[in-house]
Image (tube, rainbow, N blue to C red):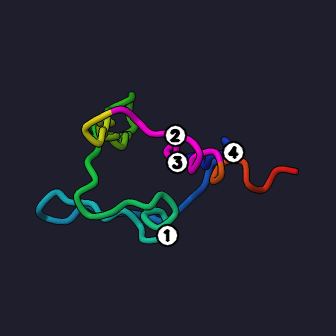
Amino acid sequence: MSSDEGEPTAYGTAERNDRGQLTIPKQLRDDLQLDGGTTFEVRREGGEIRLVREVPELETVTRGGEWGREAFRDAGGATFSNRQ
């Protein structure tokens, strides 16, 4: 495992149970905000197993018409409100 900074981070061990399941250590689940139902692609890379989190497709949301000026005003305020 690697952290966002590129440095390896150990989170303990995982043991395969008799049903073939592994439990991802709680601290890693918390750090990566993994909720129940999170899906992973399972890859074999030589002698290693990699779990790659699948990111859901983004959907375009509309409100049934053209975006009003308030949408951009609110977004700008949230984005730039701390700038001087």
Report the disc number at residue 27: 1
Q: CA distance from mark 1 to mark 3?
A: 13 Å
Please provide percent x and percent y for residue 35.
32, 63
Q: Residues within 10 Å of mark 2 (few under 14, many from 20)?
A: few
**Residue type at tag 1:** Gln
Q: Amino acid at mark 4?
A: Glu
Residue at the (52%, 63%) spot, across then down: 31
Foreground of the two, 51 or 81: 81
Q: Are marks 1 and 3 in contact (CB under 8 Å)?
A: no
Say whether disc 2 or disc 1 marks the residue closer to the N-terminus: 1
Sequence-wise, the earlier of marks 3 and 2 is 3
Of badges 1 and 3, the one in the foreground is 1
Q: CA distance from mark 2 to mark 1?
A: 43 Å
Q: Secondary structure at mark 3?
A: loop
Residue at 31 percent of width and 65 percent of height: 23
For label 1, the SS is helix
Mark found first going from the N terminus, 4 or 2: 4
Q: Which mark is residue 1?
A: 3
Q: Which residue is mark 4?
A: 5
CA distance for labels 4 and 3: 11 Å
Task: Answer whether labels 1 and 4 touch (C-beta < 8 Å).
Answer: no
4 displayed left or right of 48: right
For disc 2, the marked residue is 69
Magenta-colored span: 66-76
Query: As shown in the figure, which amino acid type bears the numbered disc 2?
Result: Arg
Residue at point 55% right, 41% down?
72
**Measured Cα–Cα span from mark 1 to mark 4:** 17 Å
Upstream in sequence: badge 1 or badge 3: 3
SS category of the residue bearing label 2:
helix
